[in-house]
Amino acid sequence: MSDKKNQKGGEFLLAAGDADEIFTPEGFTSEQCMIAKTTEDFVRQEIWPKSDKIEAQEDGVSQDLMLQAAELGLLMADIPQEYGGMGLDKASSTLIAEKMGMAGSFSVTLLNHTGIATLPIVFFGNKAQKEKFLPGLAGGEIGAYCLTEPGSGSDALAAKTTAVLSEDGKYYLLNGSKQFITSAKWAKTFIVFAQVAGKEFSAFIVERETAGVLIAPEELKLGIKGSATSGVIFEDARVPVENLLGEIGKGHLIAFNVLNIGRYKLGAAALGLAKLALEHAVKYALERKQFKKSLTEFGLIRKKIAEMTSRMFVAESLVYRTVGLIDNALEGIKGSDGETSLKVLEGIGEYVIECSIVKVYASEMADYIVDESLQIFGGYGYSQEYPVERLYRDARINRIFEGTNEVNRLLIPGMLLRRALQGGLPLMQVLENLKNEVADTSTVGEQAAVGEFPWYREKLEGARKAVLMATGLVIEKHLKEIGERQELLALLADMIMEYYALESTLLRLEKGSVGIDDWRSQALLNYFPAAMSRLLVWGREVLGVVVAPVQLAERLAQFDKFCRMTPFDTISVRDRLAEKIISVEGYPKV
């Protein structure tokens, strides 16, 4: 990773980033590439041939594959070595998540296990708990995470499940029910959240053989049918006091910190799914003939391929930039005791804004990719005989997992503002400086040739100021009731995400000194005009809400200059990009 100081979480919006300080996929080590290859080979050679059996939840198939994955080390990446794991860096474990994104339903089983079902013990378990449970989890004994209830989803702290200390002080008696629990029918251990004494939200490790633990019937789902999903019911389940995870009343720290990790790994898995969808679409388009031509010869198909690649490249850039920030923050932290775990969580928690961006951006990117892939297949794409039909259904859950995209959209600007008000980010000073200069935007314009890095930098700085201007105007009018202005917060979130995506991609090109004719440059060049148009539309909507009518024309003129772009030949750019993707029959390896 970088030897320079990281930007703080959210700081990307306040000052231009430095290409030398970011991590990119071009920087993968030989060891990381080997981990990626091992995972992809496992997916293609072991999981894909069993896909139909997995989808039917045939007895023993997924459980046996989990044992095979354990033998390859794929369940051990985030578990410390002293407890049967490998203790790898986050880039390595994220690569596993990306490649597992190609595994369909089984990816949910594995990633749920290695993430939210295992990490609570890694970070919050005491020595005895880690020694007892982590070797089994690393070895393929499946875990589950029980947070959601019939009456509480995103509002997790409203959980109704209770934990009452027994009269002899040796057990907690758990009563209540959990819903939509992944791998419930296969799990040996459960991370369960309950209210102690009805008011202190806490976490427990519950073992499968505990009396009073009941598994509800399997849910019938739209997609990810091969993953087991059901409710878990607790009827006076006797949980030993030593299975309390962390401290009483601190369950929220476990739930929310672990979700941060889940969010960036979900983004990586969505990226893997999208790459597979593109691969299927391109190969089909090469084979399919219409009007005596391959589909790849038609302009509208080439446009789809180019657009899909552009969004995928941008998503890949922001996923691994974020993982690099986290790895840099964790560099030098050694050990696995409680104090070390808290330092690790602080390092990851610093980038809660970026983790939410990765989750939202990548999950929506994947939905776009699978939709366009299905369209390229035409009527065959709607048939279960072809692979994109399943990908289409499987991708939809990603916008719901790990906190809905709506909740994450509120979190992005909300956390940015909270840190500013607490003195952690100089947002208010930056906004004040912009306010003083906003009347003079004459320097924003086409001063360099399209496709050269100075041009990108000019456009990017305009985008940053556009986002800041909209943010400042919202704060100026609605600071006191900002939490109630959800639609405005969502617009700001979209603008912030778009800027982070643009900057992450440009910094990647700058770091690699990528030439203008390289497919990666073409991907960003194609993406830029639409991104600036989106910023323009979102920002104008914000201004229409928060600016008084008498000032609106002036403010719009100032704002529009930040997003202004002179048109150029995007069709030629897309054609060159599509030609590269068609020639390699999918997303190029970097």
Image (cartoon, helix red, strand yellow):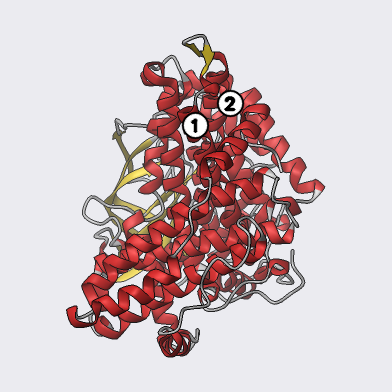
* Helix, strand or loop at mark 1: loop
* Helix, strand or loop at mark 2: helix
Report the amino acid beneath label 2: Ile
- Residue 57 in sight from this viewpoint: no
Q: In x, y percent, where is residue 279?
A: 57, 29
Looking at this rendering, what residue extends furthest in the right direction?
Answer: 30
User: How crowded is the residue under tag 1: few (<14 C-alpha within 10 Å), some, or many (20+)?
Assistant: many
Residue position for label 1: 104
Report the amino acid beneath label 1: Gly
Q: Earlier in the sequence, mark 2 or mark 1?
A: 2
Looking at this rendering, what residue extends furthest in the left direction?
Answer: 549
Residue 47: mark: 2
The image quarter containing residue 375 is top left
User: How crowded is the residue under tag 2: few (<14 C-alpha within 10 Å), some, or many (20+)?
Assistant: many
Q: Is residue 243 left or right of residue 76?
A: left
Residue sitting at x 53%, y 65%: 459
